[in-house]
Image: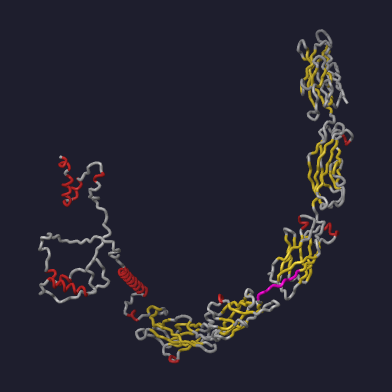
Amino acid sequence: MRTHCFLTVLLWSSVFYVIHMTPSQKRTNKHSHSERITGLSENDGKTLHRTKRGWMWNQFFLLEEYTGPDTQYVGKLHTDQDKGDGNLKYILTGDGAGSLFIIDENTGDIHAAKKLDREEKSLYVLRAKAIDRKTGRQVEPESEFIIKIHDINDNEPKFTKDMYTASIPEMSGVGTSVIQVTATDADDANYGNSAKVVYSILQGQPYFSVDPETGIIKTALPDMSRENREQYQVVIQAKDMGGQMGGLSGTTTVNITLTDVNDNPPRFPQSSYQFSSPESAPPGTPLGRIKANDPDVGENAEIEYSISNGDGSDMFDIITDKDTQEGIITVKKHLDFENKVLYTLKVEATNTHPDPRFLQLGPFKDTAFVKISVEDIDEPPVFSRPWYLIEVDEDAKEGSIIGHVVAQDPDVAKNAVKYSVDRHTDLDRIFNIYSGNGSLFLSKPLDREETPWHNITVIATEINNPKQSSQIPVFIRILDINDHAPEFANYYETFVCENAKAGQLIQTVSAIDKDQPPRGHKFFFELVPEFAVHPNFSVVDNKDNTAGIMTRRNGYSRSKMSTYLLPIIIFDNDYPIQSSTGTLTIRVCACDSQGNMQSCSAEALLLPAGLSTGALVAILLCIIILLVLVVLFTALKRQRKKEPLIISKDDVRDNIVTYNDEGGGEEDTQAFDIGTLRNPEAREESKMRRDVIPETIFQIRRTAPLWENIDVQDFIHRRLKENDLDPAAPPYDSLATYAYEGNDSIANSLSSLESLTTEGNQDYDYLSDWGPRFKKLADMYGGEDSDRD
């Protein structure tokens, strides 16, 4: 439908400054274009008149998406000053002027040059004016007007999402809201029904429905079960024009998932199960698995298994595997084939998270029976007790029986059993056992004070099958016999002051006993019969296992008796009575007026009175330290060993003999004095050999003087014989080895072997600085200039 709207240009005239306006709710622009003034002048008496002209613009309306063959006519601009002679020119400016909107400058007709889209721009504001072609004067002022685009239904509704995802719990009631979808239409909602959207469902019936105005999707069927169908795909259509024929439409897809609720109880696939277990299975051994099926998922499918009844409820247990939702049958106590062969259990499977809304559907649990058969195996012997406690007196004789252990084969065959002691628990082999009847007896004597308890292990083994054995701990307690006498708790050594008074306590003694009587220790103290009436000291029993030593006279003298030995008898009260004698040493000491000891030795009487005990101790310590240092020094000297002269037979080195007297050579017959050989005193006073260290220094034996003997050969032979028979004489043959030649000479090497390696002549003038011993060398090597001549 094409609509044309025209605006008529009206001219309103007013005289004497009177302006007439027509009220309008539309946009109105009123401008003063020209005015003619008429009036009466004071001079000529003429009347002045003023005429005011103007035009009014209303909105122009234009249809969008025009597809006609010609340009679309918009409207016409006209002023009353246009005489039709072509003198006026109309000019258009503003939104789209010259491109979208074209004006005929002669007639003022306005056309739309292009197809317009209201969704892109729905309103255009333009300005128009009229000018005189000849003078270029503006005959009408610039005026503003509006071109509004009328909408047509050219946009289909569009959903905010191409695909929606929603979920709803299963078993929901009819009309339960699932999700709301929304579609928008770009057309003008204020003009016609182009933007009025209506929703409908194209796919998803009869399970779901949609509200045509709000787009809310709801359930349409009751009790939809997730276990039957979990996923639904619903297609929703949005159509404009209020859903009428010819309206445009858009669609979207909604994926709806039914979430699980606990509306199904667990169910066992079978009513009974069968398992078996060897009787030797330890507690905690799994025997098998059972599972109840629950079509629910997640926590709604979690199951807890329990044993509700049966004769094996105390022998077996069932635990739940949280990962697989299975029940694991385990052994709870030790089984015994000989006692019971078959057990029956009633197992119950229950949902841990029931939904109160569906409790009316029935109990959310199921039961099944489990039968467990026990298999017989060859078992080791079984002792009558889990452990044995045996008490034996420590004075029991060797070979005496101290107790019995009993074990037997629990199997039907009742095989014979033999007993033995695990020697790892009885390394001293104190105990032994009769292998036939399990009687324990002693192999060695016992001593409770050394070992009051013995823990051994007894092994019982089947004779026909030695692999079948068991062991049991046996705790042996040694009972005490009073076989030890009491004795002093410590070594007691006390003193008494010279100025002590009679009846003065000088020492308290106590006793200990290795025995442990059942009523506790009780000791008695008294002097030996020979000292029953002691003139110096007495013993007073304190009745608390201690005794006090008391003085019996006034004053004691160190010079007469410096030490007293007091023998004391100690008794116990057990049977048989044991006693011992202990000796208490009492020294007589000098004390001050308060009874503090100052000196106890008799030698202290001879020392100066001003020398204190601390000074005496310091002097004594210094003497001891000096003695220790002397002993250590002597010991080190004795232990010092010299390296052997000859380490190997092949290690032959030069003998260096030093003579301080240089002789005259072979022609010097006066160099040797025969008188030295004749003088025994010169021989005896000679120094000992320095090449070996004698282990013991012997006294030089003096022989008869041979002053009258002038036969040198006979003299030498006699001396040779004496030394050969002398065991203390050093060996004649000696080899002095000098392995270390000392540091380098400060003059460096004097050898001329390396002189050829030097390129020039060496300077030997420094030999003259070494003194007269090197004068010869200095003369030989220093006269270089004369040699060259």
Q: Is residue 14 above or below residue 729?
A: above
Of 381 and 464, nearer the camera is 464
Q: Is residue 569 magenta?
A: no
Q: Could you say which quadrant of the image residue 309 lies in?
A: bottom right
Residue sticking out furthest to the top: 44
The answer, for residue 346, to whether it is visible in the render is yes
Of 460 and 560, nearer the camera is 460
Q: Is residue 378 magenta?
A: yes
Estimate the x, y position of residue 512 in percent, counting from the top left.
50, 82
Q: Is residue 750 above or below residue 373?
A: above
Quadrant where the N terminus sits is top right
The answer, for residue 74, to whether it is visible in the render is no
Q: Residue at x 23, y 69 (%)?
A: 731
Q: Could you say which quadrant of the image residue 784 lies in?
A: top left
Of 102 and 768, nearer the camera is 768
Residue sticking out furthest to the front: 464
Q: Which residues are magenta?
A: 372-380
Tally of marks? 0
Q: Left or right of 239: which side holds 502?
A: left
Estimate the x, y position of residue 43 in percent, counting from the top left.
80, 8
Q: Could you say which quadrant of the image residue 364 lies in?
A: bottom right
Q: Residue at x 30, y 70 (%)?
A: 638
Quadrant where the C terminus sits is top left
Estimate the x, y position of residue 504 in percent, counting from the top left.
45, 84
